Image: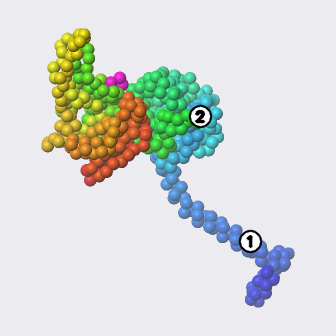
């Protein structure tokens, strides 16, 4: 092939090639190969330089974006869900976050510092007394040089330590030393999640202003185990991170009125008419609205829950007291009626305890309570832009909610099935249907905190759309 190529050259080129080959002590065919290799190498260098030049602005832009991105410390706890933290790192980086990662001692049984460091682009931190990082009080730098701290997975042990203010390793020391927002993604066995100790710890953390995403309902790592306790998926955690980093933006300047909990209608000084509402969903909505920057007034019936951070709480007992408190809180941009208000009350409550008498069953005459939702929904003046009611049903959930939407004059209805087997009334999870004039949107089972955040996101979007 080479001799054929040489023969096809004109005489002048053949003469030059012969002279060059003789000068280098090579045959003409070998000289052709050398010339071709040199030409190819030069072309590769040119192409590489052109590609590098083309990529340089992008790389510089990417570097600038990374430098301007939020600084997030990710604390990885010791649970099987720790493997999801690797995807979480990638998803956060896709959104421009700059990550520093801390692994607890238990976390290193599930993921390695090498893997975490390779993905995050920085060495993973593991020890409180690390001479490489502690020469300048490294744990304080980690705590302060961040815009947000995320704990995922947040195990039962980590939650307990956080609630108790422990600082016996790098992770808990950073959490105690920080003055930045904290977001936890709990992950544990359903029995551990349902334990009273865990509930107390979560209540304390909520009172301290710690954000929570999840957990979700699903199968556990243990064979045959299922329930509420799966760590939120990485994309859900990223959404919660973005929400916290944008705190004060979505509902800034908006006034939100929320009702929550049951009402208690006295029969006598000892007895009353009430219901099983815990107030968990209403309080979660108030907390989510406040986290989104809203001015929130929470009108709450009797509940055993801490006040949500950043919320003005008005405590009431009866439906009439709740009605008066709502009227005083108006006008507002949004009114969300999550309270389970008693439909009836005793017409004439006894001033003294009604005594039991053999053979004489007392009669109880009832009268209707004011319909707070309908009253606000049908207002002709100073009506909130969005009036949202709740429909707690035991059958024909969606159909009853659609009827209520029209009857009460509200914009949205959040409907759920509260039959005893659902476990929703008083529980930590909810399965809701968002009913509007345009249709029904059924949401999957999820934690009440997550329902609250999703609802607030929809509210913010609706208000923004109305202002355009």
Q: Give 192 or 255, whichever is nearer the viewer.
A: 192
Compared across the picture, whether 270 is left or right of 176 comes to left
- Which residue is farthest front? 359
Q: Quadrant of the N terminus?
A: bottom right
Q: Residue 241 shows which numbered tag? A: none
In which image quadrant can residue 338 be found?
top left
Q: State the CA–CA distance, disc 2 to disc 1.
A: 61 Å
Q: Position of residue 181 (x, y in %)?
A: 43, 34
**Nearest to N terminus: mark 2 or mark 1:** 1
Q: What residue does disc 2 label?
A: 222
Is residue 434 or residue 336 the one in the foreground?
434
Quarter-wise, where is residue 135 in the image?
Answer: top right
Q: Residue at x 66, y 67 (%)?
A: 44
Tell me: 310 left or right of 212.
left
Q: Which residues are magenta?
A: 303-307
Q: Is residue 361 above or below residue 280?
A: above
Q: Is residue 142 visible?
A: no
Across and down, in percent, residue 332 comes to: 22, 38
Q: Position of residue 337 (x, y in %)?
A: 27, 36
Q: Nearer the viewer, residue 314 or 168?
A: 314
Question: Which residue is located at x 51 percent, y 58 percent?
Answer: 57
Name the residue carrying label 1.
Answer: 37
- Residue 372 sits above or below residue 44 on the image: above
Q: Report whether residue 95 is seen.
A: yes
Magenta span has 387? no
Q: Residue at x 81, y 83 (%)?
A: 3
The local secondary structure at tag 2 comes to loop
- With 148 as the anchor, is 333 left or right in this view? left
Q: What residue lies at 31% left-to-right and 51% top-to-bottom? A: 439
Q: Circle 1 — which element?
A: helix
């Amino acid at each position: 092939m080479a001799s054929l190529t040489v023969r096809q050259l004109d005489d002048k080129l053949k003469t030059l090639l012969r002279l060059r080959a003789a000068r280098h002590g090579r045959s003409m065919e070998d000289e052709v190969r050398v010339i071709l290799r040199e030409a190819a190498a030069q072309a590769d260098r040119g192409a590489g330089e052109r590609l590098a030049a083309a990529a340089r602005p992008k790389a510089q832009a990417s570097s600038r974006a990374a430098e301007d991105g939020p600084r997030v410390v990710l604390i990885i706890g010791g649970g099987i869900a720790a493997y999801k933290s690797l995807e979480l790192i990638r998803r956060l980086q896709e959104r421009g976050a700059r990550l520093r990662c801390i692994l607890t001692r238990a976390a290193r049984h599930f993921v390695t510092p090498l893997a975490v460091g390779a993905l995050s682009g920085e060495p993973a931190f593991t020890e409180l007394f690390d001479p490489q990082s502690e020469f300048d009080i490294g744990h304080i730098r980690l705590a302060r040089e961040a815009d947000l701290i995320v704990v995922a997975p947040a195990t039962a042990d980590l939650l307990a330590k956080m609630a108790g203010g422990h600082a016996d390793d790098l992770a808990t020391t950073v959490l105690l030393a920080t003055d930045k927002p904290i977001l936890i993604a709990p992950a544990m066995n359903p029995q551990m999640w349902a334990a009273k100790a865990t509930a107390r710890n979560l209540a304390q953390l909520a009172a301290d202003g710690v954000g929570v995403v999840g957990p979700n309902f699903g199968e556990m790592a243990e064979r045959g185990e299922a329930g509420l306790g799966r760590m939120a998926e990485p994309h859900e955690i990223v959404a919660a991170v973005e929400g916290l980093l944008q705190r004060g933006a979505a509902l800034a300047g908006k006034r939100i009125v929320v009702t929550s909990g049951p009402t208690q209608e006295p029969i006598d000084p000892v007895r009353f008419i009430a219901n099983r509402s815990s107030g968990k969903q209403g309080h979660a909505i108030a907390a989510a609205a406040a986290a989104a920057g809203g001015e929130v007034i929470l009108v709450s019936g009797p509940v055993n829950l801490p006040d949500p951070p950043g919320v003005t709480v008005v405590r009431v007992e009866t439906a009439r007291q709740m009605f008066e408190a709502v009227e005083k809180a108006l006008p507002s941009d949004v009114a969300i009626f999550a309270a389970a208000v008693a439909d009836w009350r005793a017409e004439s409550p006894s001033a003294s305890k009604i005594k039991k008498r053999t053979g004489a069953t007392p009669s109880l005459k009832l009268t209707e309570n004011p319909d707070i939702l309908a009253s606000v929904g049908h207002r002709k003046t100073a009506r909130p832009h969005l009036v949202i009611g709740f429909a707690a049903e035991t059958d024909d959930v969606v159909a009853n909610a659609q009827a209520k939407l029209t009857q009460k004059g509200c914009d949205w209805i959040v409907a759920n099935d509260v039959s005893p087997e659902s476990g929703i009334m008083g529980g930590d999870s909810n399965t809701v249907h968002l009913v509007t004039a345009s249709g029904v949107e059924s949401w999957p089972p999820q934690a009440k905190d997550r329902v609250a955040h999703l609802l607030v996101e929809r509210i913010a979007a609706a208000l923004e759309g109305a202002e355009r």
